[in-house]
Image: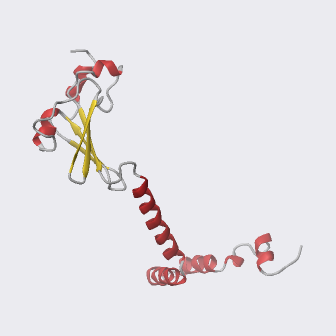
Amino acid sequence: MDKHAQRLDIFAGNELIVRVHARGSMANYLGTRAALEAEAVIPKDMEWPQGYASRTWCAGAVRFRLARTRPEGAKGPRKAFLDVDWWDLLMLPAVNEDGRARAVEIAAAELRLAQHRASPLARAAHRRMLEARYGGDKAVSAFFSTIANPSTCFPGSRMNQIAHGART
């Protein structure tokens, strides 16, 4: 075994590393063949890829991709890890193969949230919450009243003059 590949001992051993991506639509299982097989996420009759080749398959609404990967933090050339028992199993929805439909759904949800936060009702509710939380603190109340009335922040500013109809 190559000296670089021997460093695999310092990693998780037979522990499985699970990473769920921020949007929640993808996850990775990283670990040894034994750890992945113990999770029963690999089909029993599947032929494992050789080298850095990958295998893909679908099961229900989930698409899987299995590939060998260099353990995180391991140093050395990629070819030194060609036979290392460290695998990356990527799981993602099978219906959105290119991810664009999901990206549009996420963008639409973020737009709806931004529109709600900018609405007068949401802004009033937020202001009531701030007043309830910090209403007794005179310094904080003065600061919030300054934010609510920007003309008090910079009375001589160009924006304040424009807002009050002053001509230049």
Task: Give left or right: position of 44 versus 75.
Answer: left
Q: Residue at x 52, y 73 (%)?
A: 115
Q: Is residue 164 left or right of residue 26?
A: right
Q: Quadrant of residue 78?
A: top left
**Quadrant in which residue 79 is drawn:** top left
Q: Nearer the viewer, residue 76 or 28?
A: 28
Q: Residue furthest right?
A: 168
Where is residue 54 drawn, in percent x and y? 28, 32
- Give left or right: position of 152 versus 145: right
Q: In the rendering, at what x and y percent does residue 37 appear?
A: 12, 38
- As rendered, which of 90 and 100 lies closer to the eye? 100
Quick one: which residue is furthest to the top in this view? Answer: 2
| Spot occupied by residue 64 in the image (x, y as percentages of width and height) | 25, 43
Q: Is the image coloured rainbow, by chain, by secondary structure, or in one colour?
A: secondary structure
Please report the residue visible at 71 percent of the width from the left and 78 percent of the height from the top: 151
Whether 46 is drawn above or below 59: the answer is above
Residue drawn at (15%, 40%), measured in percent from left and top?
A: 42
Q: Residue at x 43, y 67 (%)?
A: 109
The quadrant of the picture occupied by the N terminus is top left
Disc count in the image?
A: 0
Look at the picture and state if 166 lies above or below 39.
below
When the figure is inspected, residue 87 is found, relative to residue 130, above or below; the finding is above
Q: Is residue 36 above or below residue 21?
A: above
Residue 132 x/y as whole percent: 45, 84
Quarter of the C terminus within the rendering: bottom right
Query: Which residue is at the front of the view, 151 or 138?
Result: 151
